[in-house]
Amino acid sequence: MNERSAARAGASNDPAGNDLAQLLDAPVGPAISSAARRQMLGVLVGTLVGFADVDATPLVTYHDQPGPAALPAHSIVSLDGAHVGRRVVLMFEEGDPDRPIVMGCIREAHAKGLSSRVGQVVVDADGDRLTVSAKERIVLRCGKASITLTKEGKLILQGAYVSSQSSGVLRIKGGSVQIN
């Protein structure tokens, strides 16, 4: 005899028990298919397809997702460009299939460690100087401002307002100097 049957059996003699029996037979919330219940209440495997907002918001897809577009997700783990294309474990905020949360990346049995796939950036700090080295380029970005260094030797300063100040001599040297 399960709990519902026991409650119904005890309810026949007790008026308060009749109310309990009616509550046990009442439907709870909207009917949800078993497939939809797995998507909302369990974990699901999806794919990290990219980032929105300059690598800030992960974009994920998963089987039977609502709509064809990648969904913005929260994440409890650090993700970067090296993770794009990898399978990720998803859960859903308040069971809402439109609000995925990346719980982590699935480690493939044949995959090497992430460090062997990611381009190496070397940082050397000795207390007096900080040197950051990369093979292709280094970009420092804050809001609308950025400084880009390329392997070809280009230094690109971009910003809504660029100021250059010097208490001594300010020299501009180059093969040619163009102003405006």
Image (tube, rainbow, N blue to C red):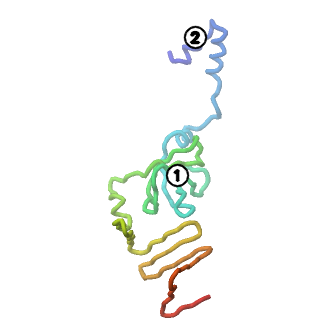
Q: Position of residue 103 (x, y in %)?
A: 47, 47
Classify mark 2: residues with Cα within 10 Å, few (<14), some (14-19) or many (20+).
Answer: some
At a point 64% along the width and 21% down the height, the residue shown is 23
**Mark 2 — residue?**
9
Q: Earlier in the sequence, mark 1 or mark 2?
A: 2
**Mark 1 — residue?**
62
Q: Amino acid at mark 2?
A: Ala
Q: Position of residue 104 (x, y in %)?
A: 44, 50
Q: Is residue 84 above or below residue 38?
A: below
Q: Amino acid at mark 1?
A: Tyr
Q: Position of residue 53 (x, y in %)?
A: 57, 62
**Residue 140 as seen in the image, left or right of residue 10:** left
At a point 52% along the width and 68% down the height, the residue shown is 141
Q: Are marks 1 and 2 in contact (CB under 8 Å)?
A: no
Classify mark 1: residues with Cα within 10 Å, few (<14), some (14-19) or many (20+).
Answer: many
* Element at label 2: helix
Q: Is residue 103 above or below residue 151?
A: above
Which dot marks residue 12? Answer: none
The residue lying toward the viewer, choosing from 38 and 121, is 121
The residue lying toward the viewer, choosing from 94 and 155, is 155
Furthest residue toward bottom:
176
Q: Tell me how far mark 1 sits from mark 2, CA to CA.
A: 45 Å
Furthest residue toward top:
13
Q: Position of residue 112 (x, y in %)?
A: 32, 59
- Viewport quadrant of the C terminus: bottom right
Displayed quadrant of residue 70: bottom right
